[in-house]
């Protein structure tokens, strides 16, 4: 998967948002996406799918800090101090 991103400061969270949007759209279309390591050992009713709930995923995503906030906060603070000088 690839895309053009003009603002590279948000590369990690943009990639996460793109992956989340892909999964949500596939699930919304009734297409089940699971891990390659997924092994079903239970007998399940025919037609049962393991599809995430987009509302819950969106709420969880809003609660979390972005990867850039966690990784680059000190670099941005240093950049702001340097600009203030």
Image (spheres, rainbow, N blue to C red):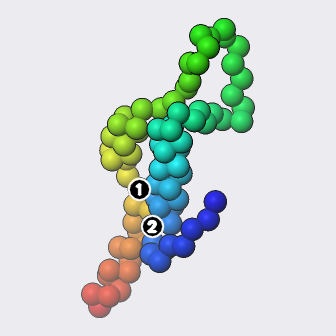
Q: Is residue 68 above or below residue 78?
A: above
Q: Residues within 10 Å of mark 1 (few under 14, many from 20)?
A: some
Observer-nearest of 63 and 85: 63
Determine the CA span between mark 2 and mark 1: 9 Å
Observer-nearest of 6 and 46: 46
Asked whether the residues under the numbered discs 2 and 1 touch, taking CB atoms below 8 Å apart as contact, a structural biologist would say yes
The circle on residue 10 is 2
Tell me the SS state at disc 1: loop
Observer-nearest of 26 and 5: 26
Which quarter of the figure is the C terminus placed in?
Answer: bottom left
Q: Which residue is mark 1?
A: 66
Which quarter of the figure is the N terminus placed in?
Answer: bottom right
Q: Is residue 51 above or below residue 16?
A: above
Q: Position of residue 58 (x, y in %)?
A: 36, 43
Q: Residue at x 39, y 66 (%)?
A: 73
Among the 4 quarters of the image, the one containing residue 10: bottom left
Q: Residue at x 47, y 42 (%)?
A: 24
Q: Is residue 58 left or right of residue 51?
A: left
Tell me the SS state at disc 2: helix
Residue 71 visible from this viewpoint: no
Q: Residues within 10 Å of mark 2 (few under 14, many from 20)?
A: some
Q: Residue at x 38, y 77 (%)?
A: 78
Q: Residue at x 42, y 32 (%)?
A: 53
Residue 74 visible from this viewpoint: yes
Observer-nearest of 51 and 17: 51
The numbered mark, 2 or 1, whose residue comes first in the sequence reads: 2
Q: Is residue 24 left or right of residue 33?
A: left
Q: Position of residue 2 (x, y in %)?
A: 61, 65
């Amino acid at each position: 998967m690839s895309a053009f991103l003009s603002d590279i400061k948000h590369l990690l969270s943009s990639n996460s948002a793109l992956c989340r949007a892909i999964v949500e759209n596939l699930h919304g279309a009734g297409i089940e996406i699971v891990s390659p390591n997924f092994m079903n050992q239970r007998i399940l009713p025919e037609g049962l799918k393991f599809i995430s709930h987009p509302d819950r995923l969106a709420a969880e995503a809003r609660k979390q800090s972005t990867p850039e906030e966690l990784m680059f906060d000190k670099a941005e603070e240093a950049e702001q101090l340097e600009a203030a000088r």
